[in-house]
Structure formats: C-alpha cells, structure tokens
Image (tube, rainbow, N blue to C red):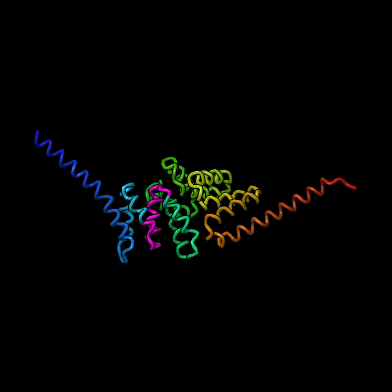
C-alpha cells in the first residue's frame, strides 16, 4: 500500500515538473530566436508543438525590439489560432520598412497555408498539381482535403484559383467568400472576388474588393496596378453604357 502511495506521489511530482518546465523552456526558446546562428526553425517547431503552454512566452516575444523575433513569435501564435499573432503581422504588413512588410506578408501567407491544413506532403502535391495546371485532379484532391479540414483557408484559395482558371465563376466566388468568412483579412480572397466581379460585369464591386485588399496589404498596390487599370476601363465602359441608355430613354423633342 505504501509503495502505491509513493508511486502516486512520484507521478504527481513528475506531472508538476512537466507543467512548470514547459512554460519555462518556452521562454528559453523565444530567447533562442534572437541568437545569431541558432536553429530558429527548430525553436519555432518546439514552440508550436508546446501549444497553449507557450502562449505567455510568445506574447512576451511580441514586445521584442528585434523585428525578426517579434514576427516569428507572431507567426507561431497565429498558427495556434491566437488572434494577437495575426494582428501583429497585419500591423507589420503596413510598416514603412519594406523588409518588415515583405516578411510579414510571407508569414501571413504561410499561416493561412498551414493552419488547419492537411499534411505537408499533401500540400506539396496540391502545389505541384497547381503548377502543372492539372486542375481537375487538384480540385478533386482539394475537395477531399476540405471535407476533412473545413477550416483550411489556404485550401479554399487554391480551389478558387482552380475554378477561375476553368471559368467556374460562381464556384470561385463561393470559395473566396468562405475564405473571408474564416479570416476577414485574407487579401488573396479579396483579389479572387475582384476577378469574379469583373467577369460578372460588376466593376464597382470589383473595385471595392481591390480597394479593401490594398487597405489590408498596401504591398499589393504595385502588383494590382494592371487589375486596377482593367477595373477603371470596365467602370468607364459601364458609364458609357448607362449614358447611351439614358439617351435612348430620353423623349424626342
């Protein structure tokens, strides 16, 4: 009986040590992110694996004066579905520092691609199918993945692009809207919707989508210059059409 009691005490002490050690080690891992030459990828993976126990340490990292540490902590938090991480990356996305903004964009895209996603090998196959324009096979695989991972924002974006390439406009619209319902800051979904509205002859809605995309991610302004030009052309054409209709409706004098 005594041995059972001692064994229970040992298990309890081990559990307490584990519960204390994980948060403490998380602070050490966050500090590792600032060490030149350190294996920061491994530290990130350990912090991600630690889950909620690493959150206090990661939130401390958000206050780091070192931008790389701050953004890495933000990415891990965002991958763990902690809104403070994505908010921090969105702030950095609007930074006047081109390097900071570019890194924030890459990190946000990686969060949407990995969060609630299938295995890395499956994601790699989807990218391979996309690059080879094997749209039918890609859509089938994505539909299977999304049935199992309905919260995967990146999957809806991949499938929306595949739909657009095949002229399936309403299906692309549906997936873009689902992506935005999951994450209202998903600027790729806003770009998809802009293309959809252009194809549906709704240039004003297309312009509103592009405007919102640029508001979230100012870096898109240069990349979307041609799309914005197309929208303005469509808006001018719509105004001309409305003027012609008003002339036809005007009674002859």
Q: Residue at x 46, y 59 (%)?
A: 92
Whether 64 is among the magenta residues is yes
| Quadrant in the picture for residue 230 | bottom right
Please say whether residue 35 is visible from this viewpoint.
yes
Which of the 4 quarters of the picture holds residue 3? top left
Which residue is located at x 59 percent, y 51 percent?
209
Residue appearing at x 39%, y 46% in the figure: 118
View extreme (top): residue: 1
For residue 192: magenta? no
Q: Nearer the viewer, residue 50 or 87?
A: 87
Magenta stretch: dominant SS?
helix
Residue 71 lies, with reference to residue 172, above or below; the image says below
Q: Picture coordinates of residue 97 (x, y %)? A: 48, 65
Residue 253 image point, x, y percent: 90, 48
Left or right for 151, reference 224: left
Q: Nearer the viewer, residue 136 or 124?
A: 124
Residue 61 x/y as whole percent: 36, 57
- Percent coordinates x, y for residue 224 in the rendering: 57, 59
**Residue at x-position 59% and y-position 61%:** 225
Magenta extent: 61-83
Q: Which residue is most to the bottom?
A: 36
In the image shown, does 127 or 36 lie closer to the viewer?
36
């Amino acid at each position: 009986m005594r041995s059972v009691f001692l064994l229970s005490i040992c298990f309890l002490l081990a559990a307490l040590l584990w519960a204390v050690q994980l948060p403490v080690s998380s602070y050490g891992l966050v500090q590792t992110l600032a060490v030149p030459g350190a294996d920061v990828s491994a530290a990130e993976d350990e912090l991600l694996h630690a889950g909620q126990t690493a959150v206090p340490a990661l939130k401390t990292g958000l206050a780091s004066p070192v931008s790389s540490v701050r953004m890495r902590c933000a990415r891990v938090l965002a991958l763990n579905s902690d809104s403070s991480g994505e908010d921090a990356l969105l702030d950095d996305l609007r930074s006047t520092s081109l390097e900071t903004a570019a890194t924030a964009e890459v990190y946000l895209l990686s969060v949407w691609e990995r969060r609630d996603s299938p295995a890395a090998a499956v994601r790699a196959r989807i990218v391979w199918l996309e690059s080879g324009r094997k749209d039918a096979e890609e859509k089938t695989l994505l539909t299977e993945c999304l049935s199992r991972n309905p919260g995967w924002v990146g999957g809806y974006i991949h499938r929306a692009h595949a739909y657009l390439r095949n002229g399936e406009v309403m299906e692309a619209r549906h997936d873009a809207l689902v992506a935005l319902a999951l994450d209202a800051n998903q600027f790729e979904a806003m770009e998809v919707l802009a293309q959809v509205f252009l194809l549906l002859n709704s240039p004003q809605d297309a312009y509103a989508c592009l405007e919102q995309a640029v508001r979230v991610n100012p870096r898109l302004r240069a990349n979307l210059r041609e799309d914005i030009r197309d929208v303005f052309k469509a808006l001018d054409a719509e105004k001309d059409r409305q003027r012609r209709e008003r002339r036809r409706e005007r009674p002859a004098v």
